[in-house]
Image: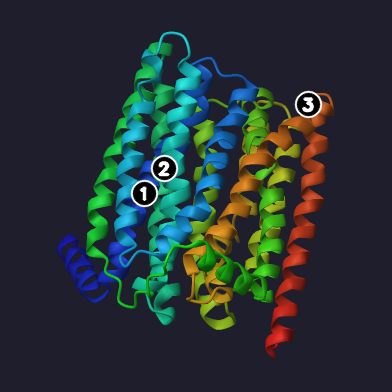
């Protein structure tokens, strides 16, 4: 039986080499980021971070990304081989995450040392790698194959996102001492660095079959590209609508951890079960949503993922309102339920963006889009914490904030439907 499975795997790898290579890319990058993202808050708290420092974990790297995205987009458009940019950013990210792991050895300003080098690592992964990846993807994968390749890669990344947080949580929970947990965090960052550097070399296996013509980097070219984008109404509407969606999504990123740690008193294992339950929900529904995309397109099905995200505030409100003996488990159940349709966000958002961006100055257009999303990612978690504090900074303030987020996320889904209908009407399509 094992030989049959191995043989089938070899046949699949030979006939779907592009999907497999992108799957390995997803395995390595999400393996590394799964380790990093499930270490950040806990490691920072053990170094002495408070609520302000926790909000800075998002704010600092996102602001750094914001200032570099547009120049990086122009630079990517000028490259004949964008894969080199992807590899270089991963290599640099690995170095910075490895340095961040040494924060515990810094005698006085350990938290700030950690924030700086974590921000630099995230700058190269969340910012520059993501930008170059999405610019290179349409050059390496034909339009008719994108849904298939993305589905395979997303399936691999979801499996990693199930295993990695659980593994990190189990290990940290099993270690009794504070110093032992600190040492484990440091080992995790070193492992993440190894995975990122390995991926920087693996990407050489993916070739651009339809590369875009390199653009000259100049102020006049930038003005021309900006004017072209402003006249692209589908792109402008898409950016505005998705920006609002992300703002309502990003607002609770720090509050979610505060609710879990301070009010539901979840330990490392229960904290790790939050992303694990979400990924399992997405994994079991991925095939359904992928087939649905093939039949109905990628625009309207994205709405289901947005509506599912609205259940996450409900999960938090219910979780902190129940006794600590079983409140976290009810929270996890509702949280997972909200993610049953969230695979549409992972699968469809990139494809929706590519549908409204022409091949001319593609990287520049994407850098504008990612600058808006990055601004939201930097500011909105801080805004969420500020609102929570203004309302009293207690469990009732947390409930009120999440209740408002529930209705705002429903509004975001409604705006997306209106935007899709307008684009279909302008292009002569049918909803």
- Secondary element type, mark 3: helix
Q: What is the spatial separation of the Cα atoms under label 3 and label 1, in whole angstroms?
A: 35 Å
Displayed quadrant of residue 104: top left
Helix, strand or loop at label 1? It is helix
Mark 3 = which residue?
389
Residue displayed at 30% across by 31% down: 190
Quarter of the image with the N terminus in it: bottom left
Q: Residues within 10 Å of mark 1 (few under 14, many from 20)?
A: many
Residue 38 visible from this viewpoint:
no
**Residue under the image location 55 percent in, 82 percent down:** 295
* Location of residue 139 in the rendering, given as x and y in whole percent from the top left corner: 37, 73
Which residue does the numbered mark 2 point to in the structure image?
A: 33
Task: Give the mark nearest the N terminus, 3 or 1.
Answer: 1
The one nearer the camera, 184 or 219, is: 219
For residue 29, the mark is: 1
On the image, the x and y values in percent for residue 119 come to: 48, 34
Q: What element carries label 2?
A: helix
Q: In which quarter of the image is the C terminus?
A: bottom right
């Amino acid at each position: 039986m094992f030989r049959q499975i191995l043989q089938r795997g070899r046949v699949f790898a030979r006939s779907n080499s592009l999907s497999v290579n992108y799957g390995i890319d997803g395995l390595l990058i999400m393996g590394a980021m799964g380790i990093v993202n499930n270490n950040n808050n806990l490691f920072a708290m053990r170094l002495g971070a408070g609520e302000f420092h926790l909000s800075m974990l998002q704010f600092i790297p996102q602001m750094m990304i914001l200032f570099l995205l547009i120049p990086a987009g122009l630079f990517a458009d000028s490259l004949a081989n964008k894969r080199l940019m992807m590899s270089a950013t991963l290599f640099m990210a690995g170095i910075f995450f490895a340095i961040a792991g040494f924060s515990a050895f810094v005698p006085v300003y350990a938290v700030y040392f950690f924030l700086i080098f974590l921000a630099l690592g995230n700058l190269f992964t969340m910012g520059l790698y993501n930008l170059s990846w999405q610019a290179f993807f349409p050059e390496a994968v034909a339009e008719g194959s994108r849904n298939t390749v993305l589905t395979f890669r997303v399936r691999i990344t979801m499996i990693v996102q199930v295993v990695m947080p659980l593994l990190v949580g189990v290990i940290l929970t099993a270690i009794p001492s504070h110093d032992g947990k600190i040492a484990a965090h440091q080992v995790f960052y070193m492992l993440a660095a190894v995975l990122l550097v390995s991926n920087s070399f693996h990407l050489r296996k993916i070739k651009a079959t339809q590369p875009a013509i390199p653009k000259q980097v100049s102020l006049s070219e930038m003005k021309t590209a900006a004017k072209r984008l402003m006249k692209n109404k589908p792109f402008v509407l898409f950016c505005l609508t998705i920006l609002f969606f992300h703002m309502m999504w990003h607002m609770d990123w720090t509050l979610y951890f505060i609710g879990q740690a301070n009010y539901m008193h979840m330990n490392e294992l229960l904290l790790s079960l939050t992303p694990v339950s979400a990924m399992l929900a997405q994994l079991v529904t991925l095939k359904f949503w992928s087939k649905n995309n093939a039949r109905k397109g990628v625009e309207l099905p994205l709405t289901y993922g947005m509506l599912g995200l609205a259940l996450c505030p409900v999960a938090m409100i219910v979780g902190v309102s129940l006794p600590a003996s079983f409140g976290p488990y009810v929270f996890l159940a509702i949280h997972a339920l909200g993610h049953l349709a969230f695979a549409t966000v992972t699968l469809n958002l990139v494809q929706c963006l590519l549908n409204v961006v022409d091949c001319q100055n593609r990287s520049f257009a994407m850098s504008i889009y990612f600058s808006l999303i990055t601004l939201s990612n930097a500011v909105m978690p801080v805004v969420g914490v500020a609102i929570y504090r203004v309302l009293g900074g207690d469990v009732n303030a947390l409930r009120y904030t999440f209740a408002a987020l529930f209705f705002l996320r429903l509004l975001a889904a409604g705006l997306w439907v209106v935007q899709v209908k307008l684009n279909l009407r302008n292009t002569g399509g049918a909803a």
